[in-house]
Image: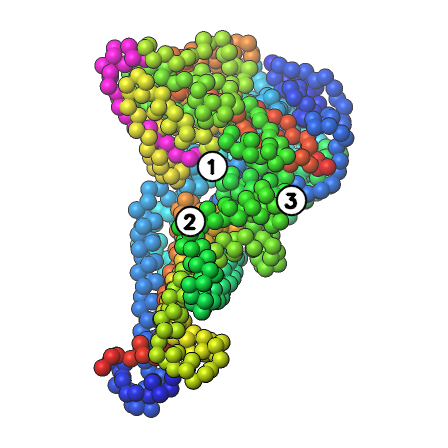
């Protein structure tokens, strides 16, 4: 790939001296995207805070529900500092954050970090496990289907993938529960109940169905993209050249075609991870999985602003990070695309 | 009424497994045996094991403060950690738990409370009069009033007096003849020790806290110093918060939990098909429709009567709770001694409803009902109501809002909405909901004759006389009130075949009113 990069083509506005040019395009992209990302997060926090202010009621109403006498409401609002102006509340939160203090949950009185910490790990395990397994399966099956194009295997995989994309994740989850946990075979736990404080991998059997659900949902997208881009790559001149040179079939497939086929797929994998960060909400709900999604739902109904803010920021940061990462990876994988066309 | 003469103490509490156990009022003890009654479900109770409960209703606002318990998950935890002075029997009658005597003076302005001796908190400290006074002061603290503050507002906080180590004098600023009933409401008299800290709670209950993660899970272990010897049966309890009944049922079927609370009628056959059991209780809780009597068109009593006549109560109960429950008659307090069973049962009468509406000039009435998923079956009942009302040409639009919106600043201001209440006795409920001074007067009911009857009743110690006054008030509820109470919903729980000792409880809370000490596993 080096010979491609060596072609002089300064990216963006950078006018750096020649020897540094190799690193520049990616580094600039990275710096610029990160700066924009941080700005985005700040806007998100303002937007979310504004949204919580528009909702009727506040944490005191949400906590007290049908036991809220005016005296009880006043007492709790004072205790939670909800009677301060909105701007002061936002400022208190931001300045706390800048001092590394995530604030205190209005609903439970516990610190946000102690409330969320374990749940971040739980959700991250779910997303990363499903994302990695789904990516490997999708890429592998895609390569396989492309190599055996128009065979029965290809047809089965393609039709199957198409069928699964039509299923919402909760249907997949419920079907898995019915077959493997609740009704047909009692092989696996139907819900994921972890002892709080224990990492989720300490009881792997409870992870199987939630991870399987998410894998089943994302594999078809990765698979279809991988298959299409591999077919493109396999039809290209350089692959034909490699074949004519007499290289072994696996070498042509994995060393010549795959690197070019993977570039467009990286974007889809990135999108899959982004989907996973949101899709866990549904899956966590179905499996009673103690993750961030379930906590966010609960926090919104409790009007628990510090918890809402923090979870939304984490999810937004994840979106930004995955976007940057997938751009960088796909640029790195296809040198042509990170240079302006001349 | 002289409650002190009666021997309810042990029977009533220990016999809480026997349906219809001796009550505080209108019952006398049949036995003073110290051994718990035989369990329903067969065999001799076995010790040991961990009870795993799947409980819905919790959130990250879950609390371990028994005086501020609000949702079902709170009650499930607090009813095992703490005990009340007065509780409810499975038949929803008041029964002494930590109290042994509660006697009013002739004007009901002062009560003498005697405490059970030899009861210890989980830290080993004995429960005394000081703890009870501290409990009432915490409930009534004007800076942070607890859930019971409104219901116990008549208690003169400053005048609470310790007569001896086990006796407390409770003076009242206004007559309060129903103190013993008010204290029996879940969370109204759970005794906390002096200096109580909800972060490290100690109570007198059969189980002590091991761990607690709000909205997720809490674990408990047997309290070996528990005052009722032989109880509890299980060594530990794990209460896990569940988000909805689908996951609860899956977990029950997969054998991951032993008991699940508050199921809907829809899943009964699904649960039973997998060899699990269903416990149906005739709960005394109620999910009323609320009409504001100060707002047109419901300010016209004829319109209110028409609304009550539109409802086909048996059909609504069938559709919403599979027929499990008790038909209502627009009056609350169904299991109380003071509930008037003689009021004629109201039936659907479309013709009568139409003529009432016509007389009131509202022939083509249309309005919006504000509903929310606040309790089992509430939104479905709203849909059924809209359907049934259409038979009389009344157009009802159902507006479904989130629970938080429902209980937001507009709560108690909706013109036509719904609500849910746990079981309560008649007069204590009146003080919460239907007096102009009541904190939750959602119908904005303000009837001078009713208020006069109440102030007379609340000062009447004689039970028979008080009952007559309560009946007169119920006649007003029945004729003019703003509530439609179509039924008292059944409470449906699921449990595994290994679980014994569950009995139906009419108080409206699930699973032995979340009191797990009598449950055993085999």
Task: Give the secondary structure at mark 1.
Answer: loop
| Tag 2 residue | A168
| Tag 1 residue | B145
Residue B256 horizontal/vertical position (percent): 62, 44
The structure residue drawn at horizontal position 35% and vertical position 35%, both measured from the top left corner, is: B400
Foreground: B411 or A243?
A243
Q: Is residue B57 above or below residue B365?
A: below
Task: Give the secondary structure at mark 2.
Answer: loop
Q: Which residues are magenta?
A: B353-374
In the rendered structure, the answer to whether residue B80 lies left or right of residue A45 reads right
Question: Residue A335 bears which disc, if any?
Answer: none
Provide the chain ID for the residue under circle 1. Answer: B
The structure residue drawn at horizontal position 45% and vertical position 65%, both measured from the top left corner, is: A145
| Tag 3 residue | B220
Question: How is the structure coloured here?
Answer: rainbow
Q: CA distance from mark 2 to mark 3?
A: 38 Å
Residue B108 horizontal/vertical position (percent): 54, 18
Badges 2 and 3: C-beta atoms under 8 Å apart? no
């Amino acid at each position: 790939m080096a010979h491609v990069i060596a072609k002089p083509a300064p990216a963006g506005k950078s006018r750096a001296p020649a020897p540094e040019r190799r690193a520049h395009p990616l580094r600039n992209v990275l710096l610029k995207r990160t700066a924009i990302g941080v700005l985005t997060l700040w806007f998100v926090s303002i937007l979310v805070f504004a949204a919580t202010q528009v909702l009727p009621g506040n944490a005191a109403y949400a906590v007290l529900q049908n036991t809220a006498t005016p005296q009880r409401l006043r007492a709790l609002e004072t205790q939670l500092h909800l009677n301060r102006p909105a701007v002061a509340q936002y400022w208190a939160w931001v300045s706390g954050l800048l001092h590394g203090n995530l604030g205190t949950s209005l609903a439970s009185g516990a610190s946000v970090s102690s409330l969320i910490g374990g749940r971040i790990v739980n959700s991250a395990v779910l997303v990363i496990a499903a994302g990695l397994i789904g990516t490997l399966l999708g890429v592998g099956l895609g390569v396989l289907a492309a190599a055996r194009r128009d065979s029965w295997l290809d047809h089965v995989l393609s039709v199957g993938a198409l069928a699964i994309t039509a299923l919402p994740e909760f249907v997949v989850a419920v079907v898995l529960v019915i077959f493997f946990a609740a009704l047909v075979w009692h092989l696996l736990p139907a819900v994921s109940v972890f002892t709080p404080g224990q990492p989720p991998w300490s009881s792997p059997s409870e992870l199987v169905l939630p991870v399987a659900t998410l894998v089943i949902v994302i594999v078809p997208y990765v698979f279809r993209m991988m298959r299409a881009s591999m077919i493109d790559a396999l039809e290209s001149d350089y692959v034909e050249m490699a074949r004519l040179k007499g290289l072994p079939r696996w070498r042509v497939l994995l060393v010549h075609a795959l690197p070019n086929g993977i570039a467009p797929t990286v974007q889809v994998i990135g999108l899959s991870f982004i989907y996973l960060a949101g899709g866990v909400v549904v899956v966590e709900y179905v499996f009673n999985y103690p993750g961030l999604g379930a906590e966010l739902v609960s926090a919104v109904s409790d009007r628990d602003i510090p918890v809402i803010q923090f979870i939304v920021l984490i999810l937004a940061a994840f979106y930004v990070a995955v976007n940057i990462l997938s751009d960088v990876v796909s640029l790195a994988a296809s040198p042509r695309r990170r240079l302006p066309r001349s | 009424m002289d409650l002190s003469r009666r021997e309810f103490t042990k029977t009533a509490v220990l016999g809480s497994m026997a349906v219809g156990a001796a009550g505080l009022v209108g019952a006398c003890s049949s036995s003073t045996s110290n051994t718990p009654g035989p369990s329903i479900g067969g065999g001799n109770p076995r010790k040991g094991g961990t009870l795993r409960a799947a409980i819905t209703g919790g959130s990250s606002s879950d609390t371990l403060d028994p005086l501020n318990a609000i949702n079902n998950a709170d009650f499930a935890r607090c009813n095992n950690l703490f005990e009340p002075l007065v509780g409810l029997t499975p038949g929803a009658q008041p029964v002494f738990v930590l109290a042994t005597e509660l006697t009013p003076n002739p004007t009901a302005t002062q009560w003498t409370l005697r405490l059970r001796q030899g009861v210890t908190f989980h830290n080993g400290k004995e429960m005394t009069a000081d703890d009870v006074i501290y409990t009432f002061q915490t409930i009534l603290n004007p800076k942070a009033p607890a859930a019971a503050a409104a219901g116990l507002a008549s208690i003169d906080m400053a005048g609470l007096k310790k007569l001896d180590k086990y006796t407390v004098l409770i003076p009242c600023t206004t007559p309060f003849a129903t103190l013993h009933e008010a204290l029996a409401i879940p969370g109204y008299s759970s005794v906390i020790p002096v200096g109580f800290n909800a972060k490290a709670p100690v109570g007198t209950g059969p189980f002590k806290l091991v761990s607690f993660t709000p909205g997720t899970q809490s674990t408990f272990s047997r309290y070996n110093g528990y005052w009722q010897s032989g109880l509890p049966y299980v060594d530990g309890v794990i209460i896990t918060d569940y988000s909805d009944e689908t996951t609860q049922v899956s977990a029950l079927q997969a054998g991951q939990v032993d008991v699940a609370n508050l199921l809907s009628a829809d899943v009964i056959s699904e649960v039973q098909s997998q060899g699990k059991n269903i416990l149906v209780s005739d709960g005394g809780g109620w999910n009323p429709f609320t009409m504001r009597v100060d707002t047109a068109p419901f300010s016209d009593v004829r319109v209110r009567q028409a609304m009550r006549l539109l409802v086909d109560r048996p059909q609504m109960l069938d559709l919403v709770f599979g027929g499990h429950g008790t038909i209502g008659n627009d009056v609350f307090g169904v299991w109380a001694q003071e509930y008037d069973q003689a009021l004629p049962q109201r039936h659907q009468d479309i013709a009568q409803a139409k003529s009432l509406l016509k007389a009131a000039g509202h022939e083509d009435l249309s309005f919006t009902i504000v509903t929310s998923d606040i309790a089992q079956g509430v939104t479905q009942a709203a849909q059924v109501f809209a359907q049934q009302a259409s038979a009389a040409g009344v157009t009802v639009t159902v507006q479904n809002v989130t629970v938080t919106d429902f209980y937001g600043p507009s709560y108690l201001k909706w013109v036509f909405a719904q609500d849910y209440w746990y079981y309560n006795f008649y007069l204590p409920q009146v003080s919460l909901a239907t007096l102009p001074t009541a904190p939750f007067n959602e119908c904005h009911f303000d009837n001078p004759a009713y208020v006069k009857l109440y102030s007379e009743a609340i000062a009447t110690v004689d039970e028979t006389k008080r009952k007559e006054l309560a009946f007169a008030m119920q006649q007003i509820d029945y004729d003019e009130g703003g509530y439609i109470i179509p039924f008292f919903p059944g409470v449906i729980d699921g449990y595994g075949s290994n679980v014994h000792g569950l009995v139906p409880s009419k108080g409206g809370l699930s699973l032995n009113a979340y009191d797990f000490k009598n449950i055993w596993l085999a």
